[in-house]
Image: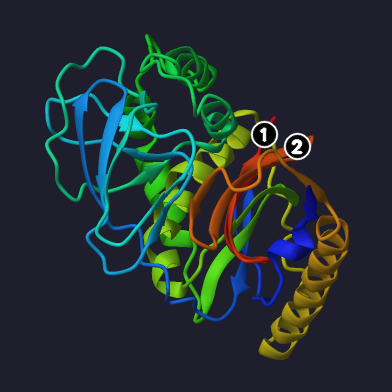
Amino acid sequence: MTMNIEKILDRTSLGRIQSAGHMQLIPILGDDDASFAPPVLQVGTCRYGSVMLKNDADRPTIVPPGAGWVVQQKAQDHAIGGGALLRAGQDRLIETALCIQQAQGGCISPAKHAMLILPAALRAKALAMRHVSDFRKHWSDITEFNRALGISNPGGHLEFFLKTFQRELDQFVAEFEIVPSQIGAIVLLGGKLVGIERAPSAAYWQVVWEPLVRVSYGSLAIQVAKSGATSVRDALSVQERSLVGIRKALRVAETREAESVDALLSVVRPIALECANDGEERIGSIAMSTVTSPRLAGQIVTVGDAVRFASICVAA
């Protein structure tokens, strides 16, 4: 089965683009589907490669693909490759999780630990191994990721990246903001599509927004900046040095930006995605499926034929 990005954007509208350095976000605006709870979970580990999740809400929830937990305890940090559906009040053990801290021992004590979402460069690889039972399966990918960013003696330690670039990652959170009725975002890097994220509600988006902007896509912006690329945003061209002249220049810049976004979306909306499975996970009429294209990979959740969740990012 195939679908296109237009289907993912069905029954939504788009807000005004936000830009900071190399990264741009186009807010996705829409109505809430309050039947899903935000993914505020109790998380723990009982052995390496196994993550225990508890949804204590009175509604089902969606755990995003690439969700991870980096803790202050003397315990090995973990993540999951694919997403998960949890019923209201459900305890669930995921036995195909991956360790993201190679040399640290110990298990995570159950608590509502802060969630991150894996760097975009790692997400497709983790997703492809979502059914593999081997807690070491992502160490070489994390090592390569760290080494490419100039981290010495990197190993399979994601926390080395988080500590090295903490200031830059925090800055992404400060530079972008959630707007009213926002349930997602189209993510661009250097004007090119790198991700589409859609949540079932604004409350859900509030929970996943920072993990996505800070680590998942912020890491991509850091990689581009390290490569020496320059920002694509044009400087404001003020012809008349007055408030009137500045306002006129702003209108011209906004018009050009809107035209650029429209041109991009005309290319993005028809992009076809192949569904690798039909309902990999199900709760009644709720189904989670994995979708791919030559450049993108991720997962969607549908209720009947309607897309309620999507987390798709660049795969190469």
- Residue reaching furthest to the top: 153
Question: Residue 278's spot in the image, x, y percent?
Answer: 65, 46
Apparent side of residue 167 relative to residue 20 in the rendered image (left or right): left
Q: Who's the residue at 14% across and 21% down the image?
A: 106
Number of numbered callouts drawn? 2
Question: Residue 105's spot in the image, x, y percent?
Answer: 17, 16
Q: What element carries label 2?
A: loop
Q: Mark 1 points at which residue?
A: 315
Q: Do the residues labelled 1 and 2 touch (CB within 8 Å)?
A: yes
Quarter of the view holding residue 227: top right
Query: As rendered, which of 68 and 135 lies closer to the eye?
Result: 135
Q: Is residue 180 above or below residue 279?
A: below
Check disc 2 and give the amino acid type.
Arg
Q: Is mark 1 on a helix, strand or loop?
A: loop
Q: Who's the residue at 69% across and 62% down the image?
A: 8
Q: Who's the residue at 57% across and 38% down the image?
A: 220
Query: As rendered, which of 19 and 124 lies closer to the eye?
Result: 124
Q: How far apart are marks 1 and 2 (CA)?
A: 5 Å
Q: Who's the residue at 27% across and 29% down the image?
A: 77
Q: Mark 2 points at which residue?
A: 295
Quarter of the view holding residue 20: bottom right
